[in-house]
Image: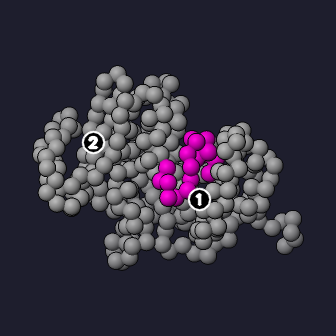
Amino acid sequence: MGKENAPATLPKLLEMKTVQQKFNEVLGSKASSFIASLLSIYQEDEKLQKCDPVSILAAAKQAAILQLPIMKQLGYAYVIPYYDGKSKKQVAQFQMGYKGFLQLAMRSGVFRNVNTVEIFEGEIKSRNKITGEIELGERTSDEVVGYVAYMQLVNGFSKTLYMTRAEVEEHARQYSQSYAYDLKSGYKTSIWSKNFDTMAKKTVLKKLLTAYAPTSIEMQNSALATALKADQALISKDTYQYVDNGGNVVDRTDNEISQNSELETVDVETGEINPAAADEVPFD
């Protein structure tokens, strides 16, 4: 195969003036540092290096549009590799962190307060199953028994959503094939196994925002609404596809997305798949 037909790599794509120009249009003076951070996470992640570079660029573009950093240690947004069982390729997925949802909610200007935290044993004194409100008691141990998300709008509306640890574990088992594999095999390779509390807080917060955040015409086009839809998606030409629990990329309706809000991440049985040629850059 001649050099001119060799598959494009992410570093090569990022050298293209058209790509740099698009990042500049979105990020302005922050574009160069964002590109540097993208290259950094790419170089540090062997699984990401095996992904279709166009899918990596598309996921990074989504984070740039939302003005969220993608460095893993910050916890705002991620570019995650996973195996697409249908195409037999490794591709990159855009994924929000719970801190990213908090950031976008506060930026929207319609929230007075929004938060998500762990609940320790003894801290739930009572819970109203009609309103979702909880009465806090005194912590009696360091055991985490659940997770709660809370939102209050500037117009005074507020809502609380609580999930027990068992409910979150069942959710993760149902929608994360890598976590289900870990439970069956005794491994700890998935994001859920490594960062259960972080993923649990994101789950309860996303469920709360999906169900109760404002849905006016203005809010439907907001960064928060975009993030809720784009989370854990394979992005192509501004369309979103999602991963089912068998590792396949599937189309889903907005209603299905809201019900299945954690369709997650890396398949531990990925093969050595070469990235596909990058025929076009996803900035159209």
Which contiguous range is marked in magenta? 60-76
Q: Which residue is mark 1?
A: 92
Viewer-nearest residue: 183 or 41: 41
Picture residue at 48% right of the left edge, 38% below the top: 104
Picture residue at 33% right of the left edge, 31% below the top: 152
Which is closer to the viewer, label 1 or label 2?
2
* The quadrant where residue 192 appears: bottom left
Give the residue type at disc 2: Leu
Q: Considering only vertical position in the picture, is 96 above or below 42?
A: above
Q: Earlier in the sequence, mark 1 or mark 2?
A: 1
Picture residue at 50% right of the left edge, 74% below the top: 269
Residue 204 in view (yes/no): yes
Q: Position of residue 276 (x, y in %)?
A: 70, 64
How many C-alpha atoms fall within 10 Å of the one at disc 1: few (<14), some, or many (≥20)?
A: many
Q: Is residue 246 left or right of residue 140?
A: right
Give the residue type at disc 1: Ala
Q: Quadrant of the C terminus?
A: top right
Tell me the SS state at disc 1: strand
